[in-house]
Amino acid sequence: MTSQKSMVTTPVLSPAELNFTHDSRILIDVLEAVYDFVAILDEDLIFLDCSASLSELFKAGGNFPIGKCLTDLFPEFAKKDLYSEYKLSSNRIGYYERDNFALDDLSIYKYPSYVRFRMFPKSPFIICTAENITIRIQYDILKQKYLKLLAKNEQLEMLLLSADTDQSKICHPPKKEDKVDLVEILENQKFFTPREIEIAMLIVKGYSTKEIAENLLVSKKTVNFHRLNIRDKLGLKNSQKSVRSCLLDL
């Protein structure tokens, strides 16, 4: 009679399977010292083994990875057809790397995450490593926002400084040589227009044609037109005397 003990069958693993199991754990332990997550897949992208960190990540979401397909666990991988990219890249340079890869499935991840992962073909397996670069991405985003805000603040400061400078040029009390009553004198002469009086006062302050145009938001051609009219009305049409000198003598 055959004993009950002899009827118990023990699964027998082939030497290749034994080597893979032993070697994969050694490889994962070594790679886990460098990368945040490590996995070994077959050519159909089925998880054969993975690091404790990756296992814990999916246990938290109630989805153990071993025996599952990569595209089921990471829908973004299938959605972006990264397997095709992997095949092309591994054929060309021997591995595939993807930077700033967003893992935004909140049913799995507590918060949106970003990883940099590499896939190395090691026939008939694929070794996959990943680094969590979420903090780096968040830093880069905040840095860009800060730089944009800084640029806007600098533009605002320049705008306010320009406005203060323009206001001081127009409203600054006239100096002694500008003759305080010059505006009143010109206004009493009915043939001077308000714009000509405005330009005349800026001429007295020593402003150039370009500066007057910038202050009054008009073209230099318009300023020159008014300057000619002012010369005519001051009787300087055929005189070498400057408009400023004549106005200061009024």
Image (tube, rainbow, N blue to C red):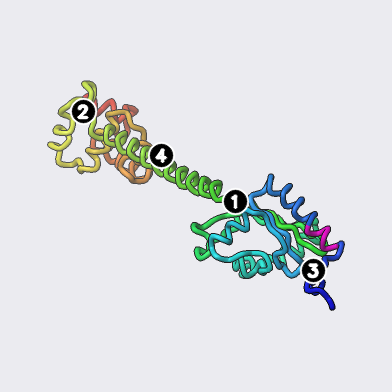
Image position of 163 (left or right of 67) = left
The kind of residue on which mark 4 rests is Glu
Find disc 1 in the rendering and name its residue: 132
Q: Secondary structure at mark 4?
A: helix
The mark closer to the camera, 4 or 3, is 3
**Where's the N terminus, which quadrant?**
bottom right
Disc on res. 10: 3
Q: Where are the magenta residues, as a range?
A: 16-21
Q: Residue at x 26, y 27 (%)?
A: 246
The kind of residue on which mark 2 rests is Pro
For the residues labelled 1 and 2, say whether their Cβ atoms are less than 8 Å apart.
no
For the residues labelled 3 and 1, say whether their Cβ atoms are less than 8 Å apart.
no
Q: N-terminal of the two: label 2 or label 3?
A: 3
Q: Which residue is nearer to you in this view: 230 or 138? A: 138
Q: CA distance from mark 4 to mark 3?
A: 76 Å
The kind of residue on which mark 1 rests is Asn
